[in-house]
Amino acid sequence: MAAVTINLAGINGIGFGIGTANGADKGDGKDGQLKNGSIFAGNINGGMSSLIEQKRAQARKQATKMLHDQFARDNEVSDNIKKLYARNETIGEELAVLAEQKKGYVEEQKALQEKYGIDPESQEQKDLELLRKANNYLKDGKLSTLSKEELERVAGMGELTEYQKRSLAYDKVIDHITSEETKLKNELMANGSSIRMTKQAILESGGKGIQNAKKAAESILQEASDAIIGMLWEEAKNHVEEEMEKLVEAAKEQAEKKEEEEEKLEAAKEDKEEQKELTEAIQESTAEQSKLQDEIKKIMMEAELLQEDMKGLVVNDVV
């Protein structure tokens, strides 16, 4: 029996063969038959071929998705950095607008003193400053830190003047703008920190994300390839055994035919010998008959001569 070899070079779709060492028994390659000394596994069994293709397709899909997801994450990181830069530019523009607005309101607020003719040292102005202080302390939960006199003064204030109302209204607007500025500046700082950390992470990773994804994808494909090889190997072994059984049966049939042919030849040979002997016997018989005929002719000729001689003798006697 010829040695069986496995060709694994075509596991990814190029081809998978089982061949004999001497390349004998070459068939047409159909239905798992040998072709050029190889059995093409794709033709061994339609169901197995379908399972192999499904497994290969599934592995390719998983590997592709893994790479795609990593590319998406990398692109997302890049897009996030771009978005942060764009957002920071917008924040800068917003801060510029707020600063301009704040400047205008501060100038308008300062103009109120002149508009209402308020002396900076007047009680009305001092009460306004105390109200501002009390409001700030109240927001911070520190109102109790005011002195007793300050608390009593705030508690005893009557109706606010028009100047005080307008000034406090400006305070609210300016405070709101300041609060928005603080939020935007904090966001700007956070974005800058996020950009720096992301860039640092990218530099430290050195593209490890996609490298790891590629390794993982290769591992998936390799595992699938190994599994396919195992499936094909088992199928191939079974197929070789089946082919061997067929070969043995065919060899037996051929051996029996050759035995029958040899028996026929032997019988024909014996018939030929008998025919030869018969022919020789016939030929001998024919020769004997021919010889006998010759003897008969000779005898007859001698008889005729004797008869003529006797006739002569009779004539002589008569004379």
Image (spheres, rainbow, N blue to C red):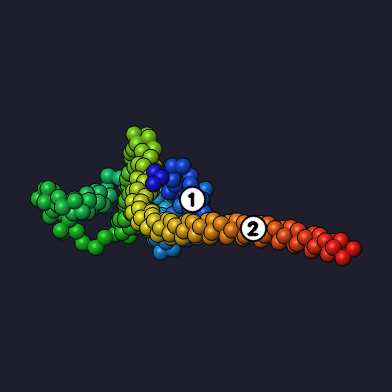
The crowding category of the residue bearing disc 1, from other C-alpha atoms within 10 Å (few below 14, some 14 to 19, many at least 20), is some
* Residue 24 in the image, given as x and y percentages of width and height: 48, 47
Left or right: 264 as drawn, with respect to 297? left
Q: Nearer the viewer, mark 1 or mark 2?
A: 2
- Image quadrant in which you'd find residue 254: bottom left
Disc marking residue 288: 2
Relative depth, front residue between 170 and 24: 24
Q: What amino acid is labelled 1 in the image? A: Asp
Q: Residue at x 49, y 59 (%)?
A: 267
Q: CA distance from mark 1 to mark 2?
A: 61 Å
The residue under the point 27% across, 44% down is 121
Q: Residue furthest left?
A: 148
Amino acid type indicated by mark 2: Glu
| Front position in the image: 67 or 51 | 51
Q: Secondary structure at mark 2?
A: helix
**Can residue 42 be spotted in the picture?**
no
Task: Kindly identify the residue that appears in the image at 70 percent across and 58 percent down.
Answer: 295
| Residue 110 drawn at (x, y percent) | 37, 48
Quarter-of-image position of residue 198: top left
The quarter in which the C terminus is drawn is: bottom right
User: Which residue is situated farthest in the right direction here?
Assistant: 319
Q: Find numbered disc 1 in the image and state the secondary structure of the residue it sits on.
A: loop
Task: Examine the rendered structure and indicate whether residue 158 appears above or below residue 174.
Answer: below
Task: Please name whichever residue, 2 or 16, is drawn nearer the observer in this view of the structure.
Answer: 2
Res 25 label: 1
Q: Is residue 210 left or right of residue 157?
A: right
Given residues 91 and 247, the one toward you in this image is 247
Q: Position of residue 20 (x, y in %)?
A: 44, 45
Left/right of residue 15 with respect to residue 183 in the rendered view: right
| Residue 280 at least partly seen | yes
Q: Are marks 1 and 2 in contact (CB under 8 Å)?
A: no
